[in-house]
Amino acid sequence: RCAEIDAVIAAKQRQNELLKEQRQSIIFEAVTKGLDPTVTYKDSGVDWIGEIPAGWEVRKLKYFLEETKGAIKAGPFGSQLTSADMSYSDIKVFNQRTVLDNDFIMGNEYISLEKHEELKGFDVVAGDVLITTRGTIGKIAIVPQDVSQGIIHPCLMRVKINRRKVIDKLLLRIFNDTNMILEQLKVLSNATTIEAVYTQKLSSITLALPDLEKQQQILDFIEAKLG
């Protein structure tokens, strides 16, 4: 009986893996080839992307950020924000779990108002994109509109994207539902595994995207297909 149960569990796990691979394949195809198979293609100049529709542009991530100081910001150094600092109840600290679970309510790490005065440069506001930089790296969450205040943990990075150039929800699909970002970070780091992500490496990853109208069409297609 135990062997039968183990076989059922293994089959379910394999099914989940196949579904994940299928999702990744659908998203990768949509965000690198578009939705019109009749268009003319051109060489992207990037090995992992291959050919892309002629009207698309290949850009570094930094191109899609706001043109302001602090558009990409790593969390505070460990010495700036210790465990003892996060035992208060005033200002919330968003951490790795916040992003992985896309849950901005749970968690019990808070700093005092006095400590917040020192760390205001790490504040987040609604619409900011938070990226994991330790452990499970390169996953993102978008700060929701109902979040009023908080700062980022040392294991996160805050990015302010330019919504005149890229749709944040499409970016979320690329980061979270494909291996495109992780594989690039490995290449940039000359490593098969990565322990941490740094601002310079992250800003240098490459994206191939069309204009906003086509981005929205691609996002609508992905959401209709995969939910």
Image (cartoon, rainbow, N blue to C red):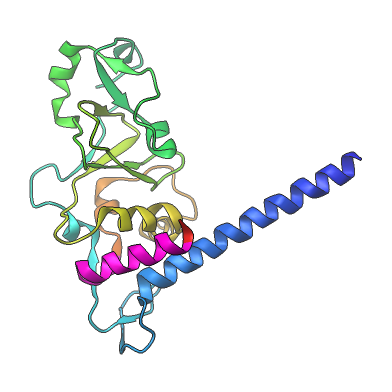
Query: Where 1 falls versus 15 (above or below)?
Result: above
Could you say which is closer to the camera, residue 17 or residue 222? Answer: 222
**In this picture, which residue range is highlighted in magenta?**
207-225
Give x and y (percent) for residue 147: 24, 30
Can residue 105 be seen here? yes
Specify the quadrant of the image occupied by residue 130.
top left
Magenta stretch: includes residue 216: yes
The N terminus lies in which quarter of the figure? top right
Residue 155 image position (x, y, % from top left): 35, 34
**Residue under the point 45% across and 58% down:** 179
Q: Where 206 falls versus 32 (above or below)?
A: above
Residue 107 found in image quarter: top left
Q: Main secondary structure of the magenta part?
A: helix
Q: Is 121 positioned to the left or the right of 86 in the image?
A: left
Observer-nearest residue: 201 or 100? 100
Outermost residue toward the front?
A: 224
Q: In the image shown, does 118 or 194 lie closer to the viewer? A: 118
Q: Residue at x 34, y 68 (%)?
A: 218
Q: Position of residue 211 (x, y in %)?
A: 20, 70
72 inside magenta stretch: no
Q: Is residue 131 positioned above or below 23 on the image?
A: above
Q: Position of residue 64 (x, y in %)?
A: 19, 58
